[in-house]
Amino acid sequence: MSIAEGTKPRRLPDRLSSRPSRILKSWEVLLAGIAILIFLANTQASPYFLNPWNLSDATLAFTEKAMIGFAMALLIISGEIDLSVAGIIALASTAMGFAAQYGMGTPGLVLIGLAVGVVCGAFNGVLVTRLGLPSIVVTIGTMSLFRGISYIILGDQAYGDYPDDFAFFGRGYVFWVISFELTLFALFALIYGGLLHFTNFGRQVYAIGNNATAATFSGIRVARVKMILFLLTGVMSGVAAVCLTARLGSTRPSIAFAWELEIVTMVVLGGVSILGGAGSILGVVIAALIIGMVTFGLGLLNVPGIVMSIFTGALLIAVIALPRLILLIRKGRTS
Amino acid sequence: MSITKNIALATGLFAGLMGTTALAQDNTRIALVAKSLGNGFFEAAARGAEEAAEEIGNVEIIYTGPTSTTAEGQIEVINSLIAQQVDAIAVSTNDPDALVPALERAMQRGITVISWDSGVAPEGRQMHLAPSSDELIGKTIIKLAADHMPDGGQVAVLSATSTSTNQNAWIAEMESVMDQYPDIEVVANVYGDDLADKSYRETQGLLQSYPDLDAIIAPTSVGIVAAAQAVQDAGKVGEVNVTGLGLPSEMAGAIESGASESFAIWNPVDLGYAAATIAYNLATGEATAEPGAEIDMGRMGTVTLDENTTAAMSEPFTYDASNIDEFKEVF
């Protein structure tokens, strides 16, 4: 009795900070508020913004990145990271282009793209979970390795002989302005949201990210969970490679260059703690929409890309710093 | 467009301070899309396009491009230009194939699409404006040498590799007009493989083998710099004139030392000017992009489209002591 008195029962937190559910909710509310503000500002700034086809085109700037972002969110929540995702896209796209040259049909090409993703993800996973190497170092290495293979195969050449029906994955529409990629984005948002928030597996991911040692002693097979997460990130990179290659209709080794940081930015902006243990898929979805709207809105005003990056960077720092600042101010008041 | 203006624009957007932008729909809006922003070559082209806009009047130039030289970045830029319903897009592409779907859509929506500098595959554009052609380059490189050899004499060619398609085509074109220069003899063709040290050694060899050599023609930006250096180091400035194709930023020293009297390369200002003028003429229906068509380029004259709807703007522009300082900062 004496021990329990004065101490509340501790639940496994979603976040590193206290008052988990409240801050979690306020984070997504904050993001959604920013998204709505940006949307309204955009409608005021350009008369071309509120056009369904234009908005549909604009979604293509983030759907592929966000699909990888979902898997990356789980990986980062578990305390790991994969910086080789853009390299995987390059390698998967090159493999598909190579096969397409020899007349491989669309189903075969998709399988190849996904298979390369799985193999690359497995390679990262084995190095991290079996050899115990830090994932940031491993994937910085494989980032260059995967893209390097593409450069060796292609040099300054390009593959472009994709079958006509392959284009559907990047340029097809399911219904009116709803593109295939947007549909896939929504579908994966639901799948990953369900996996992270409504399954045992998802709870294990949070537990590992908060304290891997404690998770191990609780009977969670940490290495196995992490291996699965690397495989998921790999296969999602394969999915993105299929979509992007179909959208471009050609493969060059520079494809998806520097996407890894844009994806990590999206995930972190979505409220996923870079230290692991906290975050939600809803946050990543809203962050994807925010980045998409900022890019498209500034593009409509012909603001150069470098200024857009400054904005995304500033937004990221602002959103990350805000909860910390609130916390500091509250501390200052109570003490 | 200045950075401060952009930041001001963007700040306005986020503060939600901007009212609905008044549309200047009476202007013809021409988008000049660069391979990437922050590259001196394309900044100079944009200045040329602005010059064309002032000359024509009622033209608004939108100079834009991605931050890095990627096809994905250019597609995003093109999508936003389609959304703005610009009248014409003139693009120097990072990928001849990947931009085709986006540009095809632009054309479906009634936007005039041309490529310039670096061409898009024919199905993705109405025409391509190349800076020059093999024939014009071949004629120019020998003329550059001949201009400083009033009494004729010996010239040697320092090329890239023996299998370089471009250089071989230019040298073949040059040889086909040699009958116009009866007093000039081409004494040797050597290959520096586009390596600075090999080009340097090959030039030393030329200077020793042909003590009466008057000019070295190097139609390669690596070779011309190495050759000028070798001539300078051998103390033959004033005796042997190095010329050919080079970049102003790399050749400024050789012009200053006198190792090179003049050299040539396309002028980005002219290229941007011509691209904007052609885009305007096509967008307003004053010209049609079809094989054999002649299109007006203002002060740059006219171009004729070949069967691939490709046109060559002009012979390369000559750089010498009179203009090198202006262009060495550009590219």
Image (spheres, coloured by chain):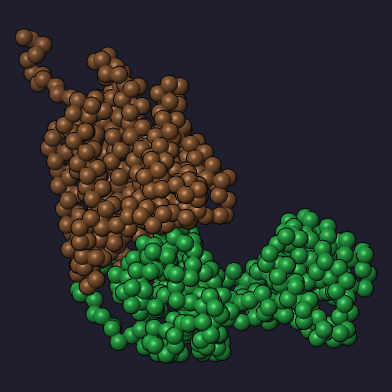
Chain colours: A brown, B green
Residue A165 at x, y = what percent? 35, 55
Residue B29 at x, y = what percent? 36, 80
**What residue is at 35 percent from the left and 79 percent from the top?**
B87
**What residue is at 33 percent from the left and 49 percent from the top?**
A64
Identify whether B262 is placed above or below A17: below
* Quadrant position of residue B164: bottom right
**Quick one: quadrant of the C terminus of chain A?**
top left
Residue A256 shows up from this direction = yes
Residue B309 at x, y = what percent? 51, 78
State left or right for residue A174 relative to residue A240. left
Q: Residue furthest top?
A: A1
State left or right for residue A45 relative to residue B304. left
**Quick one: quadrant of the N terminus of chain A?**
top left
Residue B232 shows up from this direction = no
State left or right for residue B251 relative to residue A206. right
Residue A147 at x, y = what percent? 50, 44
Q: Nearer the viewer, residue B74 or A40?
A: B74
Q: Nearer the viewer, residue B127 or B261?
A: B127
**What residue is at 89 percent from the left and 79 percent from the top?**
B153
Q: Nearer the viewer, residue B19 or A2?
A: B19
